[in-house]
Image (cartoon, rainbow, N blue to C red):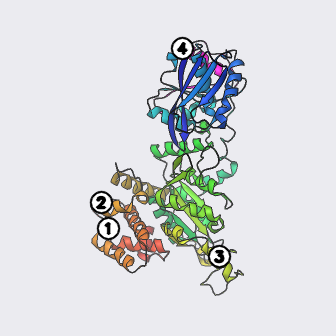
Amino acid sequence: MPFATARTVSLQGALGHLIDVQTDVSPGQVGTTLVGRPDASIHEARDRCRMAIVNSSLTWPATKRITILLSPADLPKRGTHFDLAIAVSVLAADGRLPGTALGGTVLIGELTLDGGLRSVAGVLPMVLAAADRGIHRVFVPEPQAAEAAMVPGMEVLGVRSLAQVVAELRGEEVPPAPPVAAASGSRLLSWRGEERMDEMDLADLVGMVDGRFAIEVAAAGGHHVMLSGPQGAGKTSIAERIPTVLPDLTPEESLELTALHSLAGVLDPSDGMIRRPAFLAPHHDASKAALVGGGTGQVRPGAVSLAHAGVLFLDEFPLFRSDAIEALRQPLENGDVVIARTDEQVRLPARGMVVLACNPCPCGDFTPNATTNRCRCKEVARRDYRAKITGPVADRVDILRHVEPLQPFERSDRFSVPEGSAAVRVRVAAARARQRERYDGEGWRLNAHVPGAALRDRWPLDAAGRDRLDSDVYDAKITSRGAVRVHRLAWTILDLQGPSDPRRRPGAEEVETALALRRGDALALRVLQRRAS
């Protein structure tokens, strides 16, 4: 029977679907028909595959009717990576390849007219999806073999051309072929300027005791932070050093983040799995799609997803476009992004820390408590600037810190020895380990991820802490959403205090500190003294 099936993977966001490329080659009106909701790039595959087969010294069934079904037929398909599976299925249906050789195999790659292969985006999530469905062998373009090999138990064959794939399936000697060029976007996030981040350390920051404690709590629990203050006060300096206190990614986080970077086409396979938390700081002119994901055609992750399990720093936050600011509501609240279109809905993870920085006015010099004020902005300009950060967005941020410029005596204090990132990272890692143990089997990793209902039912505050928090809710000093965030912060503060009775719950003191962090109030002296000791 002139029929064969090859397999590839279709991506909807980071979710992969196994696709059967079923081809029938039989007598009839000569032509090639593609069905199964292919997009324009897949329709064009008919010509690419035909010329790739002919120029590989193989035979295209030019006198027969060719029908190609991409099954399941109701699922939209996009991308040029279907090429290899289509070409192989045509050859198998025409009797040029043994159909049994395609069992348990997925084929991924774009074909050139001379039969060569080109790299494609999203290989890692495709191979992950194939492995979840029992596939044990995958053909990919040679530069992406290392990326595919990150999936445990998968037999990966990195190939350079269609002729090499056919020879491998026939069990013949593999012919030579020119090397395959790496994807042009694989170095998009790598540039020499990033090397400056390797030299940063919390020890560089003089003073800023409140700010240092706040980012330690934020890093330990994965909480969102807003830093406000006049220009030059040190907001950016604090934010850029947050990654230095974060521990290495867990294997699960590493695989998730690497898959997202692969999907975005910015992964360099030669670097291997991403082990350190990502730090992204897009310019304030970034579009909504660049920030939260989307785009035309294939949905691509935005900066908030590429910073998954890491840090997304949005400097000069009020200067971002209003639609981009409002689009952050969902990732700030739920830790994911849902992009809905007419024919698909894509969900992308975005459980990273979002750090916002803003000035008090457009010029950045407004200091309301100072005796002299250099700000020349009109009051209406200051009001419009602050109004860009709407209440619903601000309410989704866990920690608010006002950063004040250092006083002259603080800069020249020879007896002040700031604590370095290494010491803080040890405490953060220990606090995160306690959270992983507490939430083992629950699907949450950090306090910032736990829903409010689960906190109230299974990990409540003690009686004194609950009464302290309830009083602020009843007095309308804090919203119900804000109360949940204070509850989470209280647990993180307790986790940072070190080993204790496992039955102990956050009390009034932890809640009081959490409220101060939430509202931007000055921290109690005893808290800072305890941290310094």
Q: Which quarter of the figure has residue 45?
A: top right
- Who is closer to the viewer here, 440 or 138? 138
Q: CA distance from mark 1 to mark 2?
A: 10 Å
Magenta-drawn stretch contains 483: no
Q: CA distance from mark 4 to mark 2?
A: 58 Å
Q: Is residue 437 visible?
A: yes
Q: Which quarter of the figure has residue 10?
A: top right
- Who is closer to the viewer here, 415 or 484? 484
Residue 524 percent across, percent down from the top left: 43, 76
Which region of the structure is painted magenta? 151-179
Residue, disc 3: 384
The outermost residue toward the front is 29
Residue, disc 4: 98
Decide which of tag 1 and tag 4 comes sooner along the chain: 4
Residue, disc 1: 461
Marks 2 and 3: in contact by CB < 8 Å?
no
Residue 458 tag number: 2
